[in-house]
Image: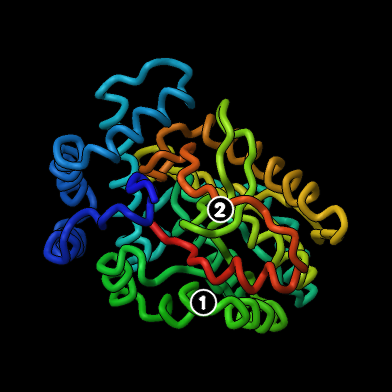
Amino acid sequence: MNDSHWKQRPEGGSRFAFHLIRFIASNGGRSIARLTLYPIVAYFLIVRGPERRASRAYLARVLDRPPTLLDVARHIHTFAATILDRVYMLSRGMDRFDVDISGLEPIDRQLDRGQGMLLFGSHLGSFEALRVLARQRPDLKVRVVLDRAHNPQLTQLLDAMDPQIARNVIDAGQDGPSIVFAIKQATDEGALVALLVDRAAPGEPSTSASFLGASAQFPTAPWLIAAALKLPVVLGFGLYRGGSHYDLVFETFSEGVAIERHNRPAILAALVQRYAERLQAHARSAPYNWFNFYDFWHADDPQQALPDAGVGADVQRRVAARRSGY
């Protein structure tokens, strides 16, 4: 397995660094806390060569020009800024942020009927910005499918700041049937269940789609879950626009995913390609918001081909691969 895959990269920073940022953020205000971002950017530029090279490779695609070192620094700074903002979003709420929301109406209609749904997010922008939904709808139940074992120090810090997050997480480290059952239980109760669907874990079956000019692998388990549970799918993007401004964009993707067994590979490929096109459109609108700091286009697992198994068995096997947080 090529060590450029995101699962093989160590977590950036230390427990002390995370808690130092939290202390400064809690006691010094956001303006002062943002000064800590510059040494973080310098650390990644100097020490974290694979992430730096991955940033260059991505920026060359999305900007359609050779990126400069300043572009790479801006890319890393945007990532660090959204991580810092997560501290404020968890500890002090969303009131200090300027959030523009679009596309919320389909979610409102579905939830008003007491029916759950799937929200497919990505590592484009801040998934934490979706917390603004709670301000719009205090009655909203949100569950997040998240790999708690990935980035454990950051996960523990955020959990400590808001224990409710830990209670609302569906741990993707469980076996596949347990994950599917937890999602079904949550949506039966009218919850919105959020998943990050742009990363395929090592060994996880996936399918390829054209994305920013080349073929990339995307996981198929989320689409199989939607089909097996007959759930509508909405896409969500929390795009950071600088300063304290975020654009929160929702798009109805499907009222219900139908995947016929005899034509399953083709249907899955079409769904993933359609998703990749929407992801690409938003990546071009906010190019420095891409937070997949690894070689996204590298096919390092020859076993990622889509096997011809039944939908139920596929769901159980594929969702066993862990979904990732930031």
Q: Which mark is residue 303?
A: 2
Other residues around mark 2 within 10 Å, as few (<14) / some (14–19) / many (≥20): few
Q: Which residue is mark 1?
A: 170
Q: Secondary structure at mark 2?
A: loop
Q: Residue at x 35, y 49 (%)?
A: 82
**96 on left or right of 114:** left
Q: Nearer the viewer, mark 1 or mark 2?
A: 2
Compared with 127, 212 (above or below) is: above
Point out the residue furthest to the top here.
65
**303 on left or right of 95:** right
Q: Secondary structure at mark 1?
A: strand
Of 209 and 164, nearer the camera is: 209
- The quadrant in which residue 254 appears is bottom right
Q: CA distance from mark 1 to mark 2?
A: 27 Å
Q: Amino acid at mark 1?
A: Ile
Q: Residue at x 74, y 73 (%)?
A: 312
